Amino acid sequence: MTLKALIAAATFAGLCSTASAQLNLYEDYDIGEAVWEITPVKVDANMGDYYLEGLRSTWIDANEISKSLGHIEDYKIMGSVTPENGNFNMLLMVKYKSMAEMVPSKEKYDAFMAAWGDAKVDESRETSKSYPELREIKGQYLMQEVMMIEAE
């Protein structure tokens, strides 16, 4: 069984676990190949700008390098319009072409580290020390798009 088929089967089982299926995978809907790694974050009140400032030189810079190397397709930060409501108020999102692209390798690591550089390692470690004072990570999720197929 291919990785995509395994993921699709697991997703399908999760979507249909409470009742017998009314829709059928590949007939009524399909699962996209791209994978979004989504991290919900609860940023403390009045700390959003400080956290974003740190992300600019750590998370954003790292994702820009990863994107330029072809390790990821895209990334986003989503902020809540109502930041004091709910369990999180920011989403950090990274898009991979497929689940296979998420697999680490020495080649990817070496390419990233060559682009990142020793000075950036030290800088990002120093910057990220303040993160526990600004925010709390609320989870990490791997999501794929569910695409409905129009009935003929």
Image: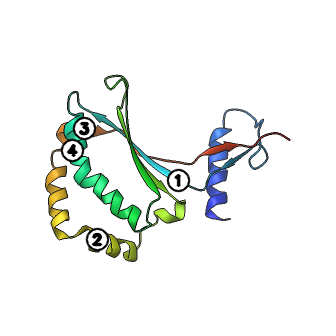
Tell me the crowding category of disc 2: few under 14, some 14 to 19, or many 20 or more residues within 10 angstroms, Cα based: some
Give the residue at mark 2: 115
Say what amino acid the circle numbered 2 marks: Ala
Task: Assign a secondary structure to mark 3.
Answer: strand
The residue depicted at 61 percent of the width and 62 percent of the height is: 3
What amino acid type is highlighted by mark number 4?
Answer: Glu
Disc on the earlier residue, 3 or 4: 4
Of circles 1 and 4, which is in front? 4
Q: Which disc is residue 135 wearing?
A: 3
Q: Which residue is mark 1?
A: 35
Label 4 SS: helix
Q: Position of residue 123 (x, y in %)?
A: 15, 59
The secondary element bearing badge 1 is classed as strand
- The disc, 2 or 3, on the residue closer to the chain's N-terminal end is 2
Spatial separation of the CA atoms under disc 4 and disc 2: 21 Å
Tell me whether the residue at label 3 lies in contact with that at label 4, contact meaning CB atoms closer than 8 angstroms: no
Q: Badge 4: few (under 14), some or many (20 or more) residues near its Cα, within 10 Å?
A: few
**Residue under the image location 67 percent in, 52 percent down:** 9
Which numbered disc, 1 or 4, marks the residue that appears first in the sequence? 1
Q: Residue 24 sits in which quadrant?
A: top right
Q: Amino acid at mark 1?
A: Val
Across and down, in percent, residue 126 comes to 13, 54
Q: Give the mark nearest the N terminus, 2 or 1.
A: 1
Crowding near the residue tagged with mark 1, few <14, some 14–19, many ≥20 C-alpha atoms within 10 Å? many
